[in-house]
Amino acid sequence: MSKKKFCIITTIPGSLKFFKGQLNYISNTFDVVAISSEKEKLIEFGKKEDIAIHYIPMKRNISLLDDCKSLFQFINYFKRECPDIVHGNTPKGAFLSMLAAKLTGISIRIYMCHGLRYQGSQGGMKVLLKLMEKLTCLCATRILCVSAGVKKTLIKDSICKQHKLNVVFNGSANGIDTSYYNREKLPDLNIWKTKLGINDNDFVYCYAGRIVKDKGINELVNAFDRLQQILQEKIHLIIVGRLENNLNPISKETEEKIKNNTHIHMVGLKSDVRSFMAISNVLVLPSYREGFGQVLVEACSLGVPCITTDITGCNEIIQDGINGKIIPPRDENALYKMMKWFYDYRDDKVKIMASNARPTIVKRYEQYKVWNALLSEYQSLFS
C-alpha cells in the first residue's frame, strides 16, 4: 500500500525548525513534502530531514500581487499532486495553503496555530490580520493549537468554533529533545564564563530570543540596570539573539544601556544557546505575547528556572513557584522585584526550583511523546 501524501507548509524554511526531526520521523508513515520559500534554504532543510521539498515563493508581509501569485501556485500544485493532508503553519503560509486546499477539495486541512500575530498589532492592521486568521480557520478542517491558551484565545476572540480546535498531548509543535538539552552533555562551561568575564560567585540572568520591544527587552534592561545599581559587580545579563530594528524595535535608550554596560553581554544570534543558558542562574522571558514559549522549555530542560509573564503558553510551561516564577506582562517594577528575589534566594528557593525544572519538562514535553501523540492525531483523521 502506498503512503498517504502529507504536505507541510511554512512561509519561510527557517520556520520548519518547529518540526526538526519530526518530519523525518513521520515520513515512515506518510509521504512527506515540505513546501516553503527561499529555495536554497528549503533544499538544505529537505536534505537534513531526508524528505521531499517543493518551492513556492511567499512574502511574509501582505502583498496582494505576490500573494495572488503564490496562491495560484498552491492551487496548481494541489490539483496536480492531490495530497491527502495539507498542514499549514505560520500566518501567510497557513492562510495561502488552507485557502488553496479548500478551493481544490483537499479533504484534510490542518492549521497549526503557533501564536496569534494580530495580538501585537493595532488599528487597521489588527483588523486585517484578525480577518486572515478567521479565514484560515474557516478553510481548515482541524486546528491544532500549540497551547491551551491559544485555543482559549481563538474561542474568546470569536476566531473559531471550539469543535475544530485541539491541543495535542500537553501542547507544543515539536516537544523538546531532552537528551540534547541536557546539562551533563555540555562541554566545560567555564570557557564561556571566562570569555564573558563572569566569576563563579556572580549571579547570571539570561534572555534568548528576538531582540524586539514585544519580548519585554526594554523592561528587562531597565530592571537589570536598577538592580545593578544596588548589587554593582555581582550580576550579569546575557542576551542571545538578533537585534531587529525594522519592526517593533527596542528603544534607543535601551540600546545605549546595552552598549555601555560591560555586565550586559549581547552575544548575537547563536545556533546553539545551551551553554549560555547553562551558565545562567535564571532565564528571563518578559514577553508581551507568545504562542508557546519554546525557550522556557529549553532552559528548564537544562535545569535552569525561569521568570516569565502571565501570558498564553508561558503560564502553562512555568508552574509558579515550582520551576520558575510568573509576573504580569509590561510591568518593569514587578520584573525588577522578581529578579531581585531570585538573587536574594539564590541559595535556597531558587536551587529547589532549579532541581524541579528538568523533571517537569521531561514529563510534559519530551520529544518522542509529542511526536507519537501528533502522529496518532494525523492517523485518526482518516478513521
Image (spheres, helix red, strand yellow):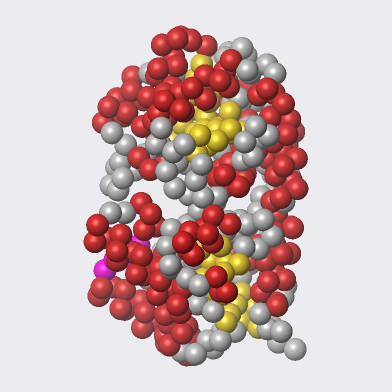
Residue at image position (54%, 79%) is: 141
Q: Which residues are magenta?
A: 59-63
Q: Image height check: is 15 above or below 50?
A: above
Count how many numbered circles sit on residues in the image: 0
Q: Is residue 346 visible?
A: yes
Viewer-closest of 100 and 153: 153
Viewer-closest of 16 and 125: 125
Magenta stretch prevailing secondary structure: loop
Locate residue 48, reporting x and y percent.
60, 60
Left/right placement of residue 208 relative to residue 359 reads: left
Residue 107 belongs to the span the image colors magenta: no
* Image quadrant containing the C terminus: bottom right
Left/right placement of residue 100 relative to residue 364 reads: left
Locate residue 193, reporting x and y percent.
58, 20
Locate residue 53, reporting x and y percent.
53, 72
Q: Is residue 285 visible?
A: no
Viewer-closest of 366 and 185: 366
Residue at image position (51%, 23%) is: 339
* Image quadrant containing the N terminus: bottom right
